[in-house]
Structures are given as structure tokens and as C-alpha cells.
Image (cartoon, coloured by chain):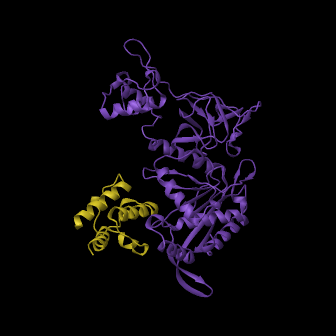
Chain colours: A yellow, B purple
């Protein structure tokens, strides 16, 4: 899976959780939750949905790596492409 | 005979519109059955019955807006004397009330031949909301009446919308029900009404305690290692359970105040859910004290999305006995709540964050949460509130026992 494809999937899932926002406008190092106004509960649902959609396991200690686009996409790329 | 009344679904509710009867006279009713859909400022709510019996007759028609406490229907329980419905708690005891206001009745539209158009109230609301001209439709319901399905079909097919229906919708602004979601203004007004009442009538007192969360957070971390991602716990599930236990220890806070304190038998904790579009909904986690932490988390996973989609049941909106508001990650350190009347207390959890914390002569960096309690001084004194916070702290230091 290319970086672009991962990004597209992440945007789709974010859009589902925060429908009125535009995830594509996120800066690479911007905090996703703050920028899109996502609470703790929705953040967990977001991680669950990524894990289900991309079929990757995201242990709790790695949640910190999902906080901005740059680190999230790098993290998922590593998981998916080894 | 039992009088089935318009339930009170919260301190902010004065009236509701009976949108649709889901049962018919002659049908056998069981406890927990959905008898009707009622529209309130908080959206379209499914109303449950709390009695067993046969539905005798309707006293309120679909589309009518009536005050809380109005008898909606009679249920035959085989007894001759008339009793009030087993509406949960004392809500049932409301003085005699007459309908104050009917929903502005849209005049029945005439067809060219002068016949009235038969349409169900729900279908009419959806039609108005979507500016669908019902005179152009052919009904598929009983006796050719237009039902919800027909309108939805018309919308998907893009049936012509007339200027006239547009004008009508403007007149019937308070009816909002294309989806179950109320409009943002109705929601704002509902919150405004409840919170004004709270601030006006309840003499709040406030207490605060810093709670060391190291043991609780370690416990959650360990518990989550064994769980698949869908079953993982949020720390708030543990906080909710600890509050339930503390309420069990200090039952005076699990009560209502209505010219006197009335302790509740069940501990049903209301959990404040904020909506992305603004406003809040407070669904109850029923019998919180008898649920495990996992069951509370499952309940949150079920109830939070439903609260956001305005798909709650009447029992979840009317039966909470105490409220929790939790700021969650990345937010404020403390929150001082306003009590939801007629309850007598609300606990606020700030963000769990790392703080310098002294314990047994040692200073360390620990995860800490600032817990506040706002309580009704008519019902309890500070010593009770203080006992409650101490008990809550104790339970959070023994997470394995929660």
C-alpha cells in the first residue's frame, strides 16, 4: 500500500467521525484530535476503524504515534509494508 | 385500568409531540415494549411502557403536542380501579394538566376532486421538512393513505416541490423531524432551560479532590494488553464504576430533591455526551453499580453513538439518578458542573495528566485527576460530599476490586 493510499483511507475514516471537517486541510504535524475537535471516545473509535480497515494491530502503547498525520502514516506504512 | 402518561424525559422537557403510535388498541403490552415515538427538543425518542396489560384506547392523537403528565392512553391490566402508570419514580404524580397547545394543524390539503388526502402524521412531518407536495403522491398505506415509505420514495425520486409547501414549513418551524435530530436552536433552548432552572433553584456547594491515578491507569493498561482493540477500555469506564461504588457508600447523593430528599433505589449514572453540532445529551447507564467495568465500556460503546444519532430510549433519558461529566484527554484540568434537576449532585473529572504528587514523604510524577463535586446544599452538607470524594478516591486506589 502506498503512502497516498494510506492517506486516502485515513481521510475517509476521519471524515466519517468528524463529518463537517476537511481532513485534507490538516498540516502534517498538526495534532489531529485538536484540529478536528475529536474527543477521547471518538479517538478510540478512529483507531478501531483504522485497525479494522487496514487489518493492523495497534497496541495501546502506540496510540501516541497516531497523533498527527506524518507519524500516523509513517507508523501505518511500517506496519503494512514491513 | 392504568393511565399511560407523557413521560418526563428530563428537567428541560415540558411537552412532547406524539409522532407515532407503535402499538394498536387490543395489543398485549409487555414491560419494556416501545409504545410510541415522541418528539422532544432532544430529538425523536422511543417511549417504553412499564406495565403489563392490553392497550385499551388512545386519548391523544398522532401529531398532538401535550404537556408532560398528560394521559396518552389507557392500558387494561384487569383491575377495575384506575391507577397511574408505573412511570418510573415520582414523575407520575403531576397535577391535572390540559393540553396547552396543539401543533399548528396544517389544513388538510384538498385534491382537485375535493377529497382529503390521507397521510400519517410522521409522513406529513417528513414531507413538510423536505418540501414534498403530497397532493402529487399516491399512498400505499391502509385505505390508500400516504405513509413514511411513500415520502421517502418521493424524495429519492425528486418529486416536484411546491412554493406553497415551502411556506408551510416555515410556519411549522418547531417540527424538525426529517431525521431524528432536533435543530440546533431547539437543542440550545433545551440546555438553556435546564441549566437556568438548576442555577436559579439549586444552592450548589463545591468540593474538589486530587486523585492519584497511577494504580488505576496501570490497571487499565494491563487490562487492555489482553484485549482486542474493539474491547479496550477507556479510563472513564473505571471512573464511572468508582462513582457508582462511592454512591453506594454515600447514598444521600444518589437522590432527588423535590421538597425533601428522596433516595433512589437504583444507581443509574447519567453520562454527559457532547454533540459535535453543539449541545449535550445525558443518557443513563442503567444499574451502573451492578455492571462490571467491561459492561460499562460496552454500554458506552452502544450508548454514545446512539446519543449522537438521537436514538435513545425513554428509560435512558428519564432514569438517571446522578450525573458525571468528564473532560477527557487534551482538555481542561477541572470542571465544575451544574446539577441536572431534580438530582442532587454532579461529579466532574478533568483531564488525567502528569503532575508532581507527594505521597508518604516522597515527591513523584504521577497521573493525577482533579475531581470536583457540585452538590445541592438543600439535600446534603459538605461533610457528605467530602465523604463521597474520599470514598471515590479509595475505590480508585483499588482498581482490581472495581
When the figure is inspected, residue B102 is found, relative to residue B190, above or below; the finding is above
Residue A16 against residue B111 in the figure, above or below: below
Horizontal and vertical percent position of residue B131: 36, 30
Which residue occupies the foreground of this view, B317 or B168? B317
When the figure is inspected, residue B335 is found, relative to residue B63, above or below; the finding is below
In the picture as drawn, the residue positioned furthest to the right comes out as B81
Quarter of the image with the C terminus of chain B is bottom right
Near-viewer residue (B104 or A7): A7
Q: Observer-nearest residue: B151 or B9? A: B151
Q: Quadrant of the N terminus of chain B?
A: top right
Question: Residue drawn 67% across and 39% down?
Answer: B52
User: Where's residue B220, x and y in %?
Assistant: 52, 72
Residue that extends furthest to the top in the rendered view of this protein? B113
Where is residue B239 drawn, in percent x and y? 58, 66
Left or right of residue B390: residue A1: left
Vertical placement of residue B186 versus A42, above or below: above
Residue drawn at x 39%, y 74% as measured from the top left: A62
Q: Quadrant of residue B138?
A: top left
Q: Residue at x 48, y 29 (%)?
A: B121
Residue B98 at x, y percent in the picture = 65, 29
Classify residue A20 as left or right of residue B118: left
Q: Give the tally of numbered discs.
A: 0
Amino acid at each position: 500500500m502506498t503512502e497516498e493510499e494510506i492517506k486516502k483511507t485515513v481521510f475517509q475514516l476521519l471524515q466519517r467521525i468528524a463529518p463537517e471537517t476537511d481532513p485534507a486541510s490538516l498540516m502534517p504535524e498538526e495534532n489531529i484530535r485538536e484540529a478536528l475537535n475529536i474527543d477521547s471516545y471518538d479517538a478510540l473509535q478512529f483507531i478501531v476503524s483504522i485497525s479494522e480497515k487496514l487489518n493492523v494491530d495497534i497496541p495501546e502503547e502506540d496510540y501516541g504515534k497516531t497523533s498527527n498525520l506524518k507519524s500516523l502514516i509513517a507508523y501505518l506504512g511500517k506496519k503494512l509494508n514491513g | 385500568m392504568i393511565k399511560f402518561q407523557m413521560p418526563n424525559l428530563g428537567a428541560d422537557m415540558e411537552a412532547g409531540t406524539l409522532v407515532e403510535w407503535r402499538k394498536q388498541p387490543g395489543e398485549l403490552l409487555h414491560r419494556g415494549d416501545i409504545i410510541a415515538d415522541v418528539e422532544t427538543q432532544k430529538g425523536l425518542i422511543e417511549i417504553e411502557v412499564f406495565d403489563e396489560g392490553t392497550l385499551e384506547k388512545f386519548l391523544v392523537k398522532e401529531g398532538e403536542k401535550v404537556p408532560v403528565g398528560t394521559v396518552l392512553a389507557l392500558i387494561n391490566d384487569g383491575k377495575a380501579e384506575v391507577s397511574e402508570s408505573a412511570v418510573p419514580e415520582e414523575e407520575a404524580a403531576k397535577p391535572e394538566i390540559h393540553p396547552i397547545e396543539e401543533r399548528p394543524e396544517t389544513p388538510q390539503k384538498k385534491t382537485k376532486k375535493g377529497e382529503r388526502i390521507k397521510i400519517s402524521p410522521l409522513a406529513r412531518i417528513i414531507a413538510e421538512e423536505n418540501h414534498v407536495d403530497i397532493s402529487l403522491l399516491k399512498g400505499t398505506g391502509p385505505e390508500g393513505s400516504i405513509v413514511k415509505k411513500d415520502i421517502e420514495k418521493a424524495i429519492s425520486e425528486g418529486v416536484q416541490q411546491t412554493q406553497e409547501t415551502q411556506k408551510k414549513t416555515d410556519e411549522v418551524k418547531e417540527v424538525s423531524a426529517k431525521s431524528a435530530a432536533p435543530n440546533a436552536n431547539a437543542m440550545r433552548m433545551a440546555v438553556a432551560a435546564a441549566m437556568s432552572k438548576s442555577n436559579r433553584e439549586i444552592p450548589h456547594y463545591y468540593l474538589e479532590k486530587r486523585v492519584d491515578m497511577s494504580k488505576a491507569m496501570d490497571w487499565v493498561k494491563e487490562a487492555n494488553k489482553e484485549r482486542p482493540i474493539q474491547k479496550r477500555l477507556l479510563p472513564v469506564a473505571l471512573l464511572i464504576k468508582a462513582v457508582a461504588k462511592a454512591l453506594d457508600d454515600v447514598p444521600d447523593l444518589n437522590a432527588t430533591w423535590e421538597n425533601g430528599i428522596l433516595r433512589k433505589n437504583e444507581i443509574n449514572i447519567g453520562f454527559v455526551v457532547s454533540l459535535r453540532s453543539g449541545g449535550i445529551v445525558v443518557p443513563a447507564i442503567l444499574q451502573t453499580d451492578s455492571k462490571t467495568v467491561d459492561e460499562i465500556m460496552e454500554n458506552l460503546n452502544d450508548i454514545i453513538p446512539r446519543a449522537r444519532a438521537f436514538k435513545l430510549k425513554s428509560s435512558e433519558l428519564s432514569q438517571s439518578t446522578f450525573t458525571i461529566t468528564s473532560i477527557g484527554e487534551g482538555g481542561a484540568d477541572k470542571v465544575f458542573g451544574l446539577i441536572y434537576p431534580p438530582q442532587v449532585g454532579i461529579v466532574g473529572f478533568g483531564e488525567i495528566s502528569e503532575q508532581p504528587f507527594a505521597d508518604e514523604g516522597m515527591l513523584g510524577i504521577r497521573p493525577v485527576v482533579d475531581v470536583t463535586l457540585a452538590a445541592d446544599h438543600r439535600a446534603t452538607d459538605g461533610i457528605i460530599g467530602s465523604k463521597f470524594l474520599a470514598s471515590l478516591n479509595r475505590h480508585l486506589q483499588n482498581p482490581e476490586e472495581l
